[in-house]
Image (cartoon, rainbow, N blue to C red):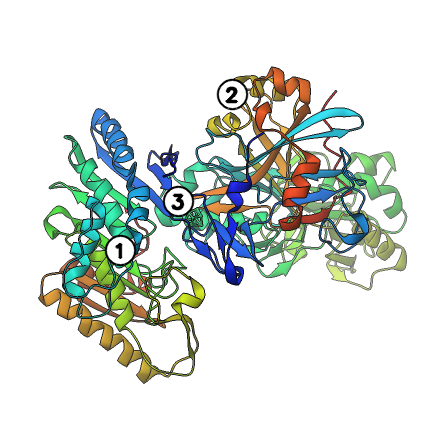
Amino acid sequence: MVDRTSLFGAAEADGIVRCDACPVLCRIRPGRAGACSRYANEEGRLVRTDPLVLLTSAVEEGRPVVPFLDAAQEWSGEVTPAEPVFVTAIGAGTTYPDYKPAPFIVGSRHHGVDTVTVVTEGIFSYCGLKVKIDTDRHLGPECAPVMHEGEQIGHVTTAEYGSQMLSLGGVRHLTGGSKREGSVTCAAMLALCRKEAIEVTIPDGARLSIQAGAAPVVNGVRETRMRVGCGSAAIGIFAQQFFGHVDEVVVLDDHITGVLSEHQAGKCLSMRPTGLRVRGRRSTPGRYFQVAHPGTGWGGTDITDPLTVLESIDPKLAWPGMRVLMTSTTGEDALYLELDDALRPIPAPMPEAVRRTVARIGENCEPAMTSILFMAGAGGSLRAGVTENPILLTRRVQAGEVRVTMGGAPCYLYPGGGITLMADILRIPDKAFGYVPTPALVAPIEFTLRADLYAALGGHVEHAIALSALIERHGAESLAAPWMSANPWPDAPG
Amino acid sequence: MTDWPPPQRCLLPDGRLHLSDGPIDLVIGLEGTRPAIQSAREAAFRALCGVLPALAAELPLLRSPLLGRPPEAKHPVACRMVEACWPLRASFITPMAAVAGAVAEHVLAAIAAVPGVSAAHVNNGGDIAVHLTPGASLRVGLAERPDRPGLGPVAHLRAEDGVGGVATSGWRGRSFSLGIADAVTVLAPRAAEADAAATLIANAVNAEHPAILRRPAEELDPDTDLAGQGVTVAVGDLPAPLLEAALDAGLRQAELLLARGQIRGAFLSLGGRMRVTGTAEIATLGAPAAFLPEGAGRAGRE
Ligand code: SF4
């Protein structure tokens, strides 16, 4: 077992601690950091500048974070403490490059299985954020740059169901462009990973404020609802409820605008043709493409006056008193019209039954959210800190025999070569991310596997320390955080 | 004496080399033929080996103020620190004022000796040693505040400018400062001189005002080379005339060094105000970023 006490220096008079991690042998006063800023003196103890985070599973949600070993739960010397503890890599530190064993290799028992968790912070030059923004509003054309503080930090990618995807960061913005582009990108990613809000702009598109887990703000307006479906889907879902209360429904959408009487749903209800024709290209009966340009008006179109989408009303089919509802796909915007004797559409008070169905469209919309996945590759040298033969680790990870977590959060492993993973940043504890001036993000990563498998992989078994010993040694400078109940406990796989 | 592990080395994804050893953190950019770059990387690593332990052994001497006779340093880097600071001893100075620049310069010298390297820079936490052959150029961003890199104007260096070192100092930076400058960036023929001069000029940007908070250096760091001096820990709102006067005091110091040929140019910034002196590359580009054309706020290799 490696002796790490030397890493934690020696105490001197006046609360000064001496760091002996390098020949400078800084003597550090309480509350100050050493010459390299990597080590600091916190109340007489030498600590890494970010505290290691220990997650305990039994602490109830919402209970405040407590120092790990309080008097009530003195360490009893068992193999595992009373509450299961998982050591995260947050604040574990890393060597760069990682030819040395990872900072912490922890042996413990979970469900009676001898388990090893290798804990390290990874420096991820190859990393980015996949951002899903629930909105129908037009944010910008595909491939458009996403700008932050005057630099391009990413681009607009595909439109998904009721949402728009952005790809932010990545190695080309971090280190492939100018130095400033790199630092701005790094700072923006770090802020988002720390669950903070940032503003981005898309030239010829929208100005956005995004924050993981919060509603996106598009051009200063907070999004509230995600659309229930495209215009055609909305017609299909609510046709029955509109039937009998209106003669025609137009659901405006930048993708497919639906017209009820012409739509299959209307036909099934034997609705009378209304002669109402909307602009755009008819795809199939009652379904229109390109009724309007994308924008920030009704239903993600540039329409603010819905009457402008009505191309014509056929006098041979329409009739005075015909009742028409126009609505967006979220029900946020709706207009009720009746035709006068000259067959002109005149806005009229919306009947109660119609209002209820419009409200129901709204109820069926989910709250709009910004969700952010962190995506990164655990590259060459990081794995060397885990085992002497990195490819074996890669193979076992790919085979599902090694559980990879980031600050305890589950990761999705991309199939194919390497260890490329994605994690929901909302499931990663606060303050998990840092950066190095490279620029690159520093993120925690833990590999958990059966102890026998670890030995077979050529793991640095001789550096493994028991969980109890780790807690004893570093518990005091660690933060105990409640386990996020949404995350599965990272047992070693099978 | 303990055997210390060698410096850590790593290639960054963009091809720059990262070397680190304790507080030394070097990011090295190289240009030239492919074999030359490979040998230069190796040369840089070898040059850094042993530097930190050797300097650590001479720390007591290097932390003493320069007075009377030049101290006899042993390691070449320690000698350069003394050499660079010696002409500045009319003000309080210790050789530590040049440590970052001298280390960068030492590693750069090993790189420049490799045939086929056309341009190189060694960035030691903001103190940069530069090697340019004719035709090569480097853009260096001048920070208005070192804690907010990326803002501020850009100096465009070419071989014929005779600038081999760029260094920045200020109270927000990583070493102590006696002055109140947000940032003083100096261009000098060599990095150690740039580092020492930046320290000195930043110390000279100073004023007395209740909003300036100072603490005895030894209260912050028991081993400081500035024992007995008050180092700046916070600067509150200061009246405009005071800011102007402080900047002018720094400018006088800079112009003195400029006249003596010790530096090529300096850029001083305090509370959003600035002063510029010296060679054309800094004078012409010494406008705030807001007045520069799009993209000029960037810094990096060209
Ligand atoms: S604090 Fe940093 S610079 Fe100081 S001795 Fe420790 S590792 Fe070296």
Observer-side mark, 3 or 2, equals 3
Q: Quick one: A7 or B34, which is closer to the camera?
A: A7
Does the closest atom of ligand 1 sit within 8 Å of the Cβ of label 3? yes
Residue name at image x 28 percent, y 73 percent: B205
Residue B81 location in percent, x, y? 21, 53
* Residue at disc 1, CB closer than 8 Å to ligand 1: no
SS state under label 3: loop
- Residue position marked by numbered label 2 in the rendering: A388
**CA separation, marks 3 and 1?**
17 Å
In the image, residue A338 sits, relative to residue A456, either above or below, namely: below
Toward the viewer: B239 or B56? Answer: B56
Of callouts 3 and 1, the N-terminal one: 3
Disc 2 vs disc 1: Cβ atoms closer than 8 Å?
A: no
**Which amino acid, mark 2?**
Glu
Which x, y percent locates residue A103?
Answer: 55, 36
Q: Provide the residue designation for mark 3.
A: B22
| Viewer can see residue A260 | no
Q: Which circle marks residue A196 in the picture?
A: none
Tell me the distance, in whole angstroms, between the alpha carbons under discs 2 and 1.
41 Å
Determine which of the numbered discs, if any, sits on residue B62 in the image: 1
Give me the chain letter of mark 3: B
Instruction: Say which of marks 2 and 1 sits in front.
Output: 1
Asked if the residue at tag 1 contacts the one at tag 3, i.e. Cβ–Cβ closer than 8 Å, the answer is no
- Kind of residue indicated by mark 1: Leu
- Please give the chain letter of the residue carrying mark 1: B
Both labels 2 and 1 in a single chain: no
Viewport quadrant of the C terminus of chain A: top right
